[in-house]
Amino acid sequence: MPSTTAHDLILRGGHVIDPSQGLDGVMDVAFRAGKVSAVAKAIKPGPATDVRDVKGAIVSPGLIDLHTHVYWGGTSLGIDAEEFCRTSGVTTAVDTGSAGPGNFMGFRKHVIERSQVRILAYLHVSFAGIFAFSPTIMVGESEEPRMLAPAECAEVAVQHRDILVGIKVRVGRHSSGTQGWAALKMALEVADKVGMPLMCHIDHPPPSYEDVIGLLRPGDVLTHAFRPFPNTPVSAQGKVKAEVIAARKRGVIFDIGHGKGSFAFETARAMLANGFQPDVISSDVHALCINGPAFDQVTTLSKFLCMGMPLNDVIAASTVNAAMAMRRPELGSLKVGSAGDATLLTVQDGTFDYVDVVGEHMEGRKRIVSEGVVIAGKWWHSSNGGLFDRMG
């Protein structure tokens, strides 16, 4: 192969699972100039190619965590994106509304632009984003109308389209108080104006789950979609509510957003039993749940694997599906020309304890583990003491 087209990096002999292309088998994956350059049974290296023997690992597109809070140092709930992604196999962390139009520039300059990990974001319609979220202080940013800044939000969204993927709003008793869905309607107006999707958080009523999804448009994301009672998507008889099914048919995207209080095994079992899988699986990792119950993205993915969701569907929910929700088709795929991100995973057998946000424990027989990450076509790190640092 001529040196002008030689690959920079080859992952050799891994089990490639790429739902965006229907790939599921042993093959090599190559990268050049920050992008995927080849996927084939055997790829010839050049004299300077970094070759990694990854036999025994699953090679997936770089994992996307669609719901994180990584404005470290700028908000009380922010965690360090690079530290989180090293252990969780995430190559794209999507911050969901930590910053609003009043403080987004600080987030961009001091965190996003300095990060080795790709950080994209939803911009909060509240001026200061999620500004008071700690073990001792909880102020719902959407309950104060004077904090909502639709004009400023639209202006900042247009200026930063390169890294903003949508508008964020939080509604529910804890986040919008007696204002109900007023903030949601305002955020939808902003999203309409700038031509972006909306991500809506929902917590305790009011408003109800049904009221919220009834306002969402095709392509909008409902996060915390598998909540515990109250505001759960299933009826007392364990059936998916008709309004939920109608919203999916309309094109509303259902995202897990595990977090500190937004995912229950009971709800998930009922939804999966009805054939209603989440479109996207995300951790909603932040300072109050990174040490449990969410922990990280691979733990969140493992919970669904242990509840019977097929591995390929689990990977799709953190790769191609998340990319499509953001309207970023260059992500979440190993197609030639796509962003040069990949995650190395293994699935361990054993007995593992998982916990949800209401304290229910589930004994699982599988655990997904991140073993290494490729970012922008370069080997970033191994998570397991260097097993895949050896040259092929």
Image: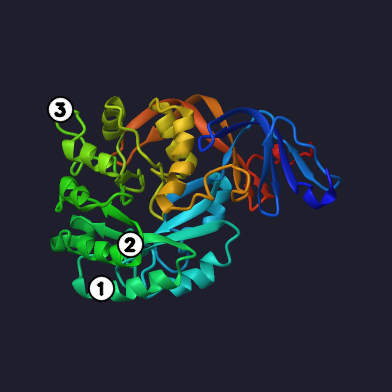
User: Of label 2 and label 1, which has the lower sequence position?
Assistant: 2
Label 1 secondary element: helix
3D distance between C-alphas at marks 3 and 1: 40 Å
Q: Nearer the viewer, residue 345 or 186?
A: 186
Q: Amino acid at mark 3?
A: Gln
Residue 233 point in image, percent of width and height: 22, 39
Name the residue beneath numbered marker 1: 147
Check the picture and name the quadrant holding the N terminus.
Answer: top right
User: Of label 3 and label 1, which has the lower sequence position?
Assistant: 1
User: Of label 2 and label 3, which has the lower sequence position?
Assistant: 2
Name the residue beneath numbered marker 3: 237
Query: Can I make out residue 223 in this image?
Result: yes
Which quadrant of the structure image shows residue 159?
bottom left
The scheme the figure's colours follow is: rainbow
Q: Amino acid at mark 1?
A: Met
For marks 2 and 3, give the one nearer the viewer: 3
Name the residue beneath numbered marker 2: 133
Q: Report the residue at 64% width, 39% height from top.
A: 384
Label 2 neighbour load within 10 Å: few <14, some 14-19, many 20+: some
Residue 386 point in image, percent of width and height: 71, 41
